Amino acid sequence: QITLKESGPTLVKPTQTLTLTCSFSGISKYSGLGVGWIRQPPGKALEWLALIYWDDDKRYSPSLMNRLTITKDTSKNQVVLTMTNMDPVDTATYYCVSGSLVTSFDSWGQGTLVTVSS
Amino acid sequence: DIQMTQSPSSLSASLGDRVTIPCRASQNIRNYLNWYQQKPGKGPKLLISAASSLQSGVPSRFSGSGSGTDFTLTISNLQPEDFATYYCQQSYSTPVTFGQGTKLEIK
């Protein structure tokens, strides 16, 4: 069974950098699955941000890739997302997910709400 | 980017009803279409992948169909736990994109 749990700040100021950590379990390096991030502004739709596979292949949303960095620490079973230059429009619930960009996102964390405000 | 359109944004139905939730892609995505269910305060749950493949543990009253640009999620014999928001998502090309969601409400 795959479990994912997000952690990070609940409040960041405009222009600051957001760092979110996903701690996961139950994902085999032979599964072909990656771990990534999807966000959802309040009352709005889901937006895929980034995904990293076991072989360190990293994929980013083109619209945000200049602000995003995704890394993994396999020894800790963690994936970290950094997003620079935060703006109030980045206020959203950020979900950690497992899956593949060519299939689906089969497991989701509970999400963490990040508010961008001065 | 491929645009996914879900209309209507909300739908009312009664217990025991059969409902269909449509999703349209802005270009041919073959069968690279997934459906998710989201309940308030929770992360989405994958229901159907590859347009019609029911995930393990998902009740058989859920089914998916379609190919190309037009897809449908069908829920038969609506149960109380089915009232939620449903999202479609294309995995044909990057960036993967989601529809705006259809909220299924009790009539």
Image: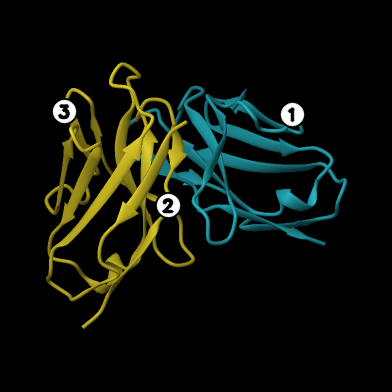
Chain colours: A yellow, B cyan
Q: Is residue A80 above or below residue A91?
A: above
Which residue position is annotated with label 2? A46
**Marks 3 and 2: which is nearer the front?**
3
Q: Check the image and name the residue furthest to the right.
A: B16
The crowd level at tag 3 (other Cα within 10 Å; few <14, some 14-19, many 20+) is: few
Quarter containing the N terminus of chain B: top left
Circles 2, 1 touching at the beta carbon (< 8 Å) = no
Kind of residue sitting beneath label 3: Asp
Label 2 Cα neighbours within 10 Å, binned few <14 / some 14-19 / many ≥20? many
Neighbour class for label 1 at 10 Å: few (<14), some, many (≥20)?
Answer: few
Q: Tag on residue B60?
A: 1
Outermost front residue = A75
Residue on which the image places disc 3:
A56
Q: Position of residue A23 (x, y in %)?
A: 30, 44
**Mark 3–mark 2 distance (CA, rounded to whole Å):** 24 Å
Q: CA distance from mark 1 to mark 3?
A: 37 Å
Q: What amino acid type is highlighted by mark number 1?
A: Ser
Q: Of helix, strand and loop, which one carries label 2? A: loop
Picture quadrant of residue A59: top left
Amino acid carrying label 2: it is Leu
Taking A53 as reference, is A66 above or below it?
A: below
Give the mark nearer the N terminus: 3 vs 2: 2
Q: Quick check: A5 above or below A25?
A: below
In this view, the residue in front, A87 or A28, is A28
- At a point 53% along the width and 31% down the height, the residue shown is B69
Residue A87 seen in the figure = yes
